Amino acid sequence: MNKRQSPLKNAMLTGLLTVSLAGFTVPVFAKPGGSPAEECGKYGASYFYKCDFKGGTCVKDPDSKGDVTIVGDETSGTWSSDTAIDIMIVKGGTLRDPTMYDPAENNGPYNNGGIGGKDISHLTFCVYEPQQRGACVVTFEDETQSCYQWHHQGDEACKATVGTTFTPPGMEVIGAEWHLNDNCKNLGVKLLATGVSLTAKVAGNKVKLKLTTSAEPGTAALLILRGNKLSNGGTEIDVACEFPSGGSPYTCTDDSAADTYRAAEIEYNGRLIIYDEVTPK
């Protein structure tokens, strides 16, 4: 995987430049196909609004439950809504690029970067109903706990995880508790990935990168950041590679060798964790 611009990169850099991660946008990855209700249902959310691009205008689906104002075309633009939106899905060709907002947002940008630069066919907006907002804290067979936000429709769905096996961490769930209108940060449940290790091996003018973890209980995505030292003592940071959670080990090749590399983790609650730098050898 080579370097490329992406919504994930833009969101990560925004978080770094503003320091605060409030309103952090965490893109996730999903398979294409399905009605708007099914699109939103993949994330335990309800269908709110959809529009299809026709002749440069996004035309509202008559089954929409509310209204979203779209200013832009099939490549990029902005959206706004009186109703706070939890998930926006950009669809084009066979690709879909969902973006989750935590907390929910009333406006934001959209673009076709996450669908390979193809024209956007439609935009779908999803909301979590009151009974869907909360956190599911699960206890594994080794008595460790993990917390999952916005991914269950309520108490019944949360408790249905008992007896199932989560991968990662690959252990059976022996207990589950639903916390309505709460979040993992407030509950104090540890979300951090464990066993994070990054290697950077020089191969000619390129660098082969490998990132491994032993568990990712609350990780939405992982990044490998490239850093180049500046004459003023600072370090310019860019994204070399990005990965959805759940596929360790992660490998990619940076076509232009940097001075240093770092692993970074984006959690479902929006926190950004950056690990110690590694010098390519």
Image (cartoon, rainbow, N blue to C red):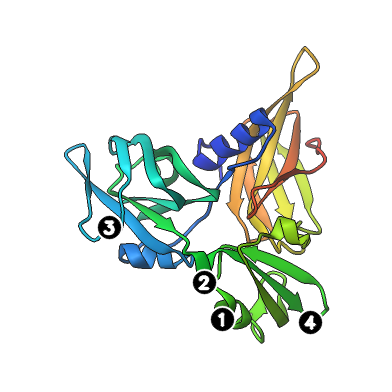
Q: Which mark is residue 68?
A: none
Point out the tag, 4 or 3, that comes first from the N-terminus.
Answer: 3
Between 191 and 23, which is closer to the camera in this rendering? 23
Indicate the amino acid at tag 1: Glu
Between 153 and 196, which is closer to the camera in this rendering? 153
Q: Which mark is residue 64?
A: 3
- Which of the two discs, 4 and 3, sits closer to the camera? 3
C-alpha gap between disc 2 and disc 4: 24 Å
Q: Residue at x 69, y 47 (%)?
A: 271
Residue 87 percent coordinates (x, y)? 46, 53
Point out the tag, 1 or 3, that comes first from the N-terminus.
Answer: 3
Residue 263 percent coordinates (x, y)? 73, 44
Q: Residue at x 34, y 66 (%)?
A: 37
- Which of the two discs, 2 and 4, sits closer to the camera? 2
In the image, taking residue 259 as reference, residue 243 lies left or right, namely left
Q: Provide the residue designation for mark 1.
A: 156
SS class of the residue under badge 1?
helix
Q: Provide the residue designation for mark 4.
A: 141
- Residue 24 sits in quarter: top right
C-alpha gap between disc 1 and disc 3: 27 Å
Point out the tag, 3 or 2, that comes first from the N-terminus.
Answer: 3
Q: Residues within 10 Å of mark 4 (few under 14, many from 20)?
A: few
C-alpha gap between disc 4 and disc 1: 20 Å
- Which of the two discs, 4 and 1, sits closer to the camera? 1
